[in-house]
Every structure is written in C-alpha cells, then in structure tokens.
Amino acid sequence: MSNKARFVVDQGIFTEGIALGCSYDLPNNTQALASAGAGVEPLLVSRKDRADLYRRVERAVDSTGLNGHSCMLRAVCEAETLLPPRAHLVMELVRIALAMPLQGVTDREPHGHRDYMMARLNGLHGVDCSAQYPDCPISLLRLAAALVPATM
C-alpha cells in the first residue's frame, strides 16, 4: 500500500470570491426596542437605521481608497433604475435597503438623511447617477450584480 497523498488537480473546482463584511447590530431584546422607541416616528427610525447601514458601507468603501460617501449616494441613486422590484431575492433585499423613505424629514434628523433622500429622488427622476456623483468612479450595484449568480 502506498503512502502517497492524492490531490485533485482540476483547477475548475476553485473559485474566487469577494466579500464585503458590514456588521450590523441586531437587537436581542425586542422589549427594549418597544420601550426605547415609544413616541418615535417609524420613518425616523427607518431612516436612522438605513443611514447607519450606509455609514458602515461607506467606511468599508473608504478602506479601498474610493470615496465611500459619494459611492453610497450613487448606489442609492442607481437603485431606482438598476434594481427592478421582485427581480431577484438578493437584489430585492439590496433595493429595499437602499430605498431611503422620502416622507417628511424632521428638523431632528441629521443633514445626511437629506443627502440620501436627494440621491433617491435623483434616481426616481432619471438623473444620470454617474454624472451626479463623479467622485465615485464605479457602480457598487453593478459590481454587486456581477457577483450574484444569475441562477439564484
């Protein structure tokens, strides 16, 4: 009996992947959410959560040497035209996450919320997002779409 190790030499079994990790703090005590959010407008909470997610993605994109804020604004803008509703489960989740609520911004909200709302409005009105946000040379959505298998 031979002690030789056998290896698969077929290079086709190996794949390359690009992963972008954005940790997102999920609540573990829903009762705390109910009491903490009492009297807070649901849209304010929705915009706050999205803006928090956007900031995390911005930091990840910044670490690649690109302008994270501009790229995130471009992604919010492009989501309105590049991501049709119910086309693909993963892309639908991305579309929902990028759909910043447009209803009444209050004075208590950070100015950044208005930036994201304007980006979404630009997309809804058919503005050329790459021209509107020239500090971002790539489309994060086109990159993400290229990474998602078409059979999902």
Image (tube, rainbow, N blue to C red):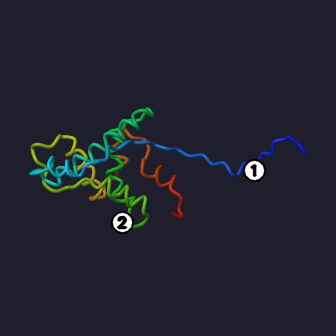
The label shown at residue 10 is 1
Q: In this view, does 2 lie to the left or right of 118?
A: right
Question: CA separation, marks 1 and 2?
Answer: 39 Å
Please determine whether, in this image, residue 53 is positioned above or below residue 92: above
> Where is residue 90 shown, x and y percent of the image?
43, 59
> Where is residue 132 shown, x and y percent of the image?
32, 46
Residue type, numbered disc 2 = Pro
Query: Which of 71 and 89 lies nearest the eye of the viewer?
Result: 89
Q: Pointer 2: residues within 10 angstroms few (<14), some, or many (20+)?
A: some
Residue type, numbered disc 1 = Asp
Identified at 21% across, 45% down, the residue is 113
Identified at 81% across, 45% down, the residue is 6
Identified at 25% across, 47% down, the residue is 49
Q: Pointer 1: residues within 10 angstroms few (<14), some, or many (20+)?
A: few
Identified at 63% across, 48% down, the residue is 15
Secondary structure type for disc 2: loop
Q: Which of marks 1 and 2 is in front?
A: 1
Image label count: 2
Image quarter (top left, top right, bottom left or bottom right) of the N terminus: top right
Q: Do the residues labelled 1 and 2 touch (CB within 8 Å)?
A: no
Q: In this view, does 50 lie to the left or right of 62?
A: left
- Residue at image mark 2: 85
Secondary structure type for disc 1: loop
Q: Give the residue at the far right of this rendering.
A: 1
The tag earlier along the polypeptide, 1 or 2, is 1
Q: Give the residue at the far front of this rendering.
A: 1
Query: Which of 67 and 20 lies nearest the eye of the viewer?
Result: 20
Please determine whether, in this image, residue 60 is positioned above or below residue 48: above
Q: In this view, does 67 lie to the left or right of 102?
A: right
The label shown at residue 40 is none
